[in-house]
Amino acid sequence: MSDDAPADAAARRAVAPVLVYPADSLPPPPLALYGTALAGARKVDEVRVAPRDAAAVSLEAGQFLRIVSVEGPQVGDLNLFHRDDLSERFYSGKTRALHGTHVGLGDRLWSCLPHLRPMATIVEDSLGWYGTDAFGGRVHDVIGTRCDPYTGRLLGRGDYHHCCHSNLTRALADDAGLSLEAAEAHVHDVLNVFMCTGFDAEGRYFMKASPVRPGDHLTLFAEIDLRAVLSACPGGDCAAEHTSDVAQCHPLLMEVWAPEEGALGGWQPPERNPYGGSHGR
């Protein structure tokens, strides 16, 4: 204990925490409805993401995006956008505040302000069995930001052009018909699909070998029209490195599944957040 600690330091540390956003305050997603729709769905598109590269796919509200490990252990960095409005994109920080540092079955991926609505809901997670390991590691995090060439320079490394930030930038530019500069402005903090991460006793972010196996998958229900951009991280399973050509890397697969007509009943995409935007003026 520090010498300048107050006399009541122990009592102050013992104050019980309060959840900022209790989960029961969020409307639950209709997982049974989504599950029934997925059971009868057919695959309508498929995009293969090459190692150390990224690719994009679009899907309509009410369809499913399944991200699949196809050859070997590989993590992916996922960006999500409204298909027709790049200003509405995934908000990892708010998703983390609402659901926790790692997401799983039934959790939703939320869009940025001022839109703030569910973009997608996790309806399948074949790594749900992993739970929390002895080191505090879990899978599918919304903690890490994505590997990028700027941090590489900051840490005294040379330029590296196949980090996830650069991969996502190239793929979005190609898919949306943008310049690299314009596309980069839209690339944002990611969902680290299949990545196993946590915090050590000092509060430092760690990664470890992903438990993902060929055939493992994460399936998202598209709550709105989506453009998904996925990078197959140059770290492979992120057992040791995440920004180099040393790690063994594998492709990932993005599949789009469409439910049968009428399978979702009267379901409708969520509206944008109703806050009026006056900000007190």
Image: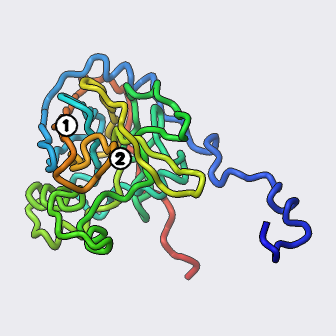
Identity, as a three-letter code, of the amino acid under mark 1: Leu
Q: CA distance from mark 2 to mark 1?
A: 13 Å
**Local crowd size for mark 2, using a 10 Å CA cut-off: few (<14), some (14–19), many (≥20):** many
In which image quadrant can residue 194 be found?
A: top left
Q: Residue at x 18, y 34 (%)?
A: 253
- Locate residue 68, reporting x and y percent: 24, 31
Give the residue drawn at x 37%, y 59%. 145
Amino acid type indicated by mark 2: Asn
Q: Position of residue 272 (x, y in %)?
A: 41, 55
Q: Secondary structure at mark 2?
A: strand
Q: Residue 93's spot in the image, x, y percent?
A: 47, 58
Q: Which residue is mark 2?
A: 192
**Residue at the image position 54 percent from the left and 41 percent from the top:** 136
Horizontal placement of 25 versus 91: left or right? right
Q: Report the residue that reaches farthest toward the right.
A: 7
Q: Which mark is residue 119?
A: none
Query: Which residue is under mark 1?
Result: 252
Of 107 and 84, which appears nearest the observer?
A: 107
Whichever of labels 2 and 1 marks the residue nearer the N terminus, that label is 2
Q: Is residue 237 above or below residue 158?
A: above
Q: Tell me if residue 230 can be seen.
A: no
